[in-house]
Image (cartoon, rainbow, N blue to C red):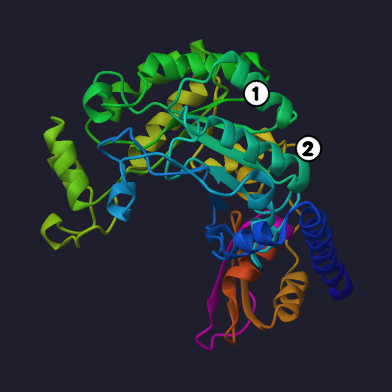
Amino acid sequence: MTSLSASAIREILEEKSRLRELLSSQLSESEKKSAERDYHAKRPPRPCGITVHTAIGCVYQCRYCYIYDMGFKIEVKPYPLRGLQLAYALLSNKYFIPGSRGTYLAIGSISEPFHPAVVNKTLEYIEAFYRYLNNPVQFSTKAYLSSQVCEKLANISSKRISPLVTVVSLSESASLEPYAPKPEKRFETIRNLREAGLKPFLFLRPVIPGLTEKEYEEIIDLAVEHGAIGVVAGTLRVTRRILSELREAGLDVSVINRRLKIPVEKMRSNVQYDVYTSDIKSQVANYARRKGLVFFPSACMANLYTHNTSCWKMVHMNVELSVKPREVDFEVVESIVKQLGGEASKVIFNRGELLVYTSSKVDSRLISEVLRSYFLACVRVTRSKGNGGRLE
């Protein structure tokens, strides 16, 4: 088992080095230095992958959006790196794993990637990712994507890319999303994506208590009519400013306040707080499945789905595709942790989640990403408090 995991890590490092050298030969010294200093070359991935920025800032000003609390401006600035540089930056990131089982890439977290000012930049990035990295790539959008753009997306990704098209409300869209394209244009985007041979998902995010319950059936019906294959529902995260924005938009925020774990008066400025929506998501999931759609609670699952891959959580949802997760072997887990400088004192694997306790200080994010890639499981690595032994 030790030799098996050692071989896997060696193959990852060798392929990463080979790709980095390949891209290095196509960049100038100044381009390489800019990429190596870039944000994408340094930060660790989240459990859902690394968010890739084709632009900074957003002009849509959606009232539920938290990027403005993070310091981003009401503007669209194309990201300065070109596609090869961004791919090189990722390969310079010690946490990034290239390949079809590697680090998930998500585009559209702090901007609209298909805004007219950056649509060509986004296409350039996506083309570079599939040509050189081959990682699962996903984007989320509220924009209208023409048939030509959708055909281009299908061609450069070999019809694998995962599209998420956001629709939050029909009746309140004008007040909640004052500068975003109308929902009917987004449904047309779903149709264009499907006709190009892609597998678009309705992105019902955020779920807004007091509003989503009234509209999700109609929204899902329209998504089905326009060719969506599935639904991803996402949690609402609020700040003091967002609650004020929602109130100004005419929503009854008392419904939201009751679902917060912390009283509003104790919320810290600019800090995001999750709103409990699991019960509403369950209703959405049940209705989506009755309409013949796939439902996932996490966007990364939709990303894997369109790339014909299933993780352990998807297996537990009875979604098994061509590329399957490896059986979780505790000896392999312990061996990988040891090779990366730690010692596993306890390993728990339950319903697709792998929890590893280590008895020494380690780079937990690096270990998590290697284990996630190897087993296709959700992974959390934490410092042990002295309780040894193994549990399933």
Location of the C terminus by quadrant is bottom right
Q: According to the image, label 1 marks what residue?
A: 198
The amino acid pointed to by label 1 is: Leu
Whether residue 262 sits left or right of residue 360 in the image: it is left
* Residue at figure coordinates x 58%, y 49% from the top left: 81
Residue 79 place in picture, x, y as percent: 51, 46
Residue 350 place in picture, x, y as percent: 59, 60
Location of the N terminus by quadrant is bottom right
Q: According to the image, label 2 marks what residue?
A: 322
Q: Name the foreground residue: 256 vs 7.
A: 7
184 magenta-colored: no
Labelled disc at residue 289: none
Is residue 326 among what the camera can see?
yes
The answer to which image quadrant residue 147 occupies is top right
Q: Name the foreground residue: 354 vs 161.
A: 161
Residue 262 versus residue 204 in the image, above or below: below
The amino acid pointed to by label 2 is: Ser
At numbered mark 1, what does the secondary structure look like: helix, strand or loop?
Answer: loop
Is residue 275 among what the camera can see?
no
Could you tell me how far apart the alpha carbons at marks 1 and 2 are, in whole angstroms?
18 Å
Residue 215 place in picture, x, y as percent: 31, 22
Magenta span: 373-392
Q: Name the foreground residue: 369 vs 291.
A: 369
- Tag in front: 1 or 2: 1
Residue 128 versus residue 193 in the image, above or below: below
